[in-house]
Image: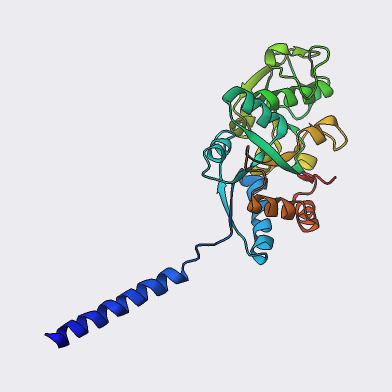
């Protein structure tokens, strides 16, 4: 009996030591950063940043979203540390409408908006009744309408600027009596063949394989007010501004290595924001 008990005790001791050893091998202090991002160019840029962060001892996990709502909600819920997909005016407007607390911690890059051909090859070809598709959310629609105004297609109320919130109802055609149609931003590139021309967000143009420099009819210049106003940023839930991992991520995204990567990869479709 004593011999049997000794054997059982030895087995339990081995199991216990094995369990402890396994537990000890688990990295409970893993340095991890989680980000909610649009697939292109944000997730691509983050992939490069992740390589640099790995050398610094960080693990970067990226969750991709195609819409402009979920990246904010998962950060607000605390499921993800930060997001990288939007510009400040959009975040401010979302906060005001939804009661969220998104706080900008760093500006990373700028994506010029472009007007792209659909059934019409140029703006001079526009005819009465032609449809122009623009994003249907407040700040991005304003931005699209300002670009159309800059190119002589419409006029907007006096004093309209990048901080205004205007819609298609505020636009007056200046030549051809075009129809401005508001569409969810992610859908516009898929509907190009159903409209005369479309105004695309930079990330959705890239996702559709379009180059703002080569494929658009007209686009925002890097010296425009839009260039600084609509910088894509890293944002967090209020109170998380000093998160160590988010700070490390921002440092890498603003580094010369990422500036060079963006310039070499996107040929003007994405412009690093360097102050």
Q: Which x, y percent locates residue 143?
A: 74, 26
Q: Which x, y percent locates residue 106?
A: 73, 43
Near-viewer residue (41 or 96): 96
Q: Which x, y percent locates residue 172?
A: 76, 11
Q: Quadrant of the C terminus?
A: top right
Q: Which x, y percent locates residue 188?
A: 62, 31
Residue located at (75% from left, 55% from top): 258
Residue 222 shown left or right of residue 36 in the figure: right
Near-viewer residue (61 or 185): 61
Name the image quarter holding residue 98.
Answer: top right
Name the image quarter holding residue 131.
Answer: top right
Vertical arrangement, residue 168 with respect to residue 3, above or below: above
Residue located at (65% from left, 50% from top): 246
* Outermost residue toward the right in this view: 223
Residue 8 shown left or right of residue 144 in the figure: left
* Outermost residue toward the bottom in this view: 3
Residue 16 shown left or right of residue 80 in the figure: left
Near-viewer residue (148 or 17): 17
Vertical arrangement, residue 196 with respect to residue 190, above or below: above
**Whether residue 219 can be seen here:** no
* Outermost residue toward the left in this view: 1
């Amino acid at each position: 009996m004593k011999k049997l008990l000794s054997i059982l005790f030895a087995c339990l001791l081995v199991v216990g030591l094995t369990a402890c050893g396994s537990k000890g091998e688990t990295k409970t202090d893993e340095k991890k950063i989680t980000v909610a991002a649009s697939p292109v160019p944000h997730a691509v840029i983050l992939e490069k940043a992740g390589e640099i962060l790995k050398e610094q001892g960080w693990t970067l996990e990226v969750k991709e979203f195609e819409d402009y709502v979920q990246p904010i909600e998962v950060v607000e819920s605390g499921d993800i540390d930060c997001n990288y997909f939007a510009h400040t005016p959009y975040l401010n407007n979302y906060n005001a409408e939804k009661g969220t607390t998104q706080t900008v911690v760093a500006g990373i890059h700028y994506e010029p908006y472009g007007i792209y051909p659909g059934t019409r090859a140029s703006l001079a070809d526009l005819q009465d009744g032609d449809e122009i598709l623009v994003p249907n959310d407040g700040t991005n629609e304003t931005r699209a309408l300002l670009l159309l105004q800059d190119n002589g297609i419409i006029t907007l109320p006096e004093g309209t600027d990048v901080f205004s919130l205007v819609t298609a109802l505020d636009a007056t055609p200046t030549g051809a009596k075009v129809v401005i149609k508001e569409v969810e931003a992610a859908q516009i590139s898929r509907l190009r063949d159903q409209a005369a021309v479309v105004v695309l967000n930079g990330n959705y143009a890239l996702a559709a394989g379009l180059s703002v420099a080569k494929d658009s009819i007209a686009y925002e210049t890097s010296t425009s007010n839009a260039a600084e106003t609509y910088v894509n940023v890293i944002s967090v839930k209020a109170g998380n501004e000093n998160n160590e991992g988010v700070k490390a991520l921002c440092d890498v995204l603003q580094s010369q290595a990422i500036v060079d990567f963006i310039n070499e990869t996107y040929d003007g479709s994405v412009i690093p924001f360097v102050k």
